[in-house]
Image: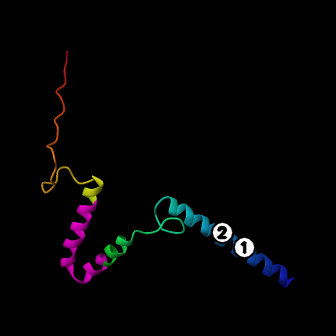
């Protein structure tokens, strides 16, 4: 009777581990975590330490803001209304509506 109980417990533990594995793979596909297929960007580790360092030394916040802005500019996601943004050409006005 004891061996059957042990086998059931081991089977349930293996099933739970497999379900956790599948959950982690699903979360990785959504980009929430790094698990087996994707490797984290080494630069993100430095940024994480800067976030923690910011708690102790608030002047480090400037460095984080500069890094975030440069990352957004590289991706082309910078705020178009930001006066500090340097654009190559001024924004184009839309043509007037023709009622004819």
Main SS category, magenta section: helix
Callouts 1 and 2 close, C-beta under 8 Å:
no
Q: Residue at x 18, y 29 (%)?
A: 95
Q: Residues within 10 Å of mark 2 (few under 14, many from 20)?
A: few
Up-down relation of residue 73 to residue 43 (above or below): above
Dot 1 alpha-carbon crowd within 10 angstroms: few under 14, some 14 to 19, many 20 or more = few
In the image, residue 56 lies at what x, y percent?
25, 84
Where residue 75 appears, x then y in whole percent? Answer: 30, 55
- Give the mark count: 2
Asked if 30 appears above or below 87 in the picture, the reply is below
Left or right: residue 14 compared with residue 92: right
Residue stretch rendered in magenta on the structure: 50-71
Q: Which residue is pictured at 16% across the width and 27% down the height?
A: 96
Quarter holding the C terminus? top left
Q: How far is the residue under mark 1 from the one under mark 2?
A: 10 Å
Q: Secondary structure at mark 1?
A: helix
- Labels 1, 2: front one: 2
Residue at image location 52% in from the left, 69% down from the top: 35
Instruction: Decide whether residue 57 is among the magenta residues.
Output: yes
Q: How is the image coloured?
A: rainbow
Reading the image, the residue beneath label 2 is 18
Place of residue 80 in the rendered image (x, y in percent of width and height, measured from the top left): 20, 49
Q: Which residue is mark 1?
A: 12
The numbered mark at residue 69 is none
Assign a secondary structure to mark 2.
helix
When asked about the image quadrant of residue 7, the answer is: bottom right
Whether residue 54 appears in magenta in the rendering, the answer is yes
**Residue at 48% from the left image edge and 68% from the top image edge:** 34
Is 20 on the left or on the right of 2, as rendered? left
């Amino acid at each position: 009777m004891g061996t059957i109980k042990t086998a059931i417990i081991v089977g349930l533990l293996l099933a739970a581990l497999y379900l956790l594995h599948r959950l982690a793979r699903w979360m990785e596909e959504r980009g929430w975590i790094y698990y087996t297929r994707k490797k984290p960007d080494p630069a993100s580790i430095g940024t994480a330490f800067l976030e923690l360092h910011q708690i102790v030394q608030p002047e480090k916040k400037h460095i984080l803001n500069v890094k975030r802005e440069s990352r957004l500019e590289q991706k082309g996601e910078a705020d178009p209304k930001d006066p500090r943004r340097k654009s190559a050409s001024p924004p184009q006005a839309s043509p007037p509506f023709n009622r004819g």
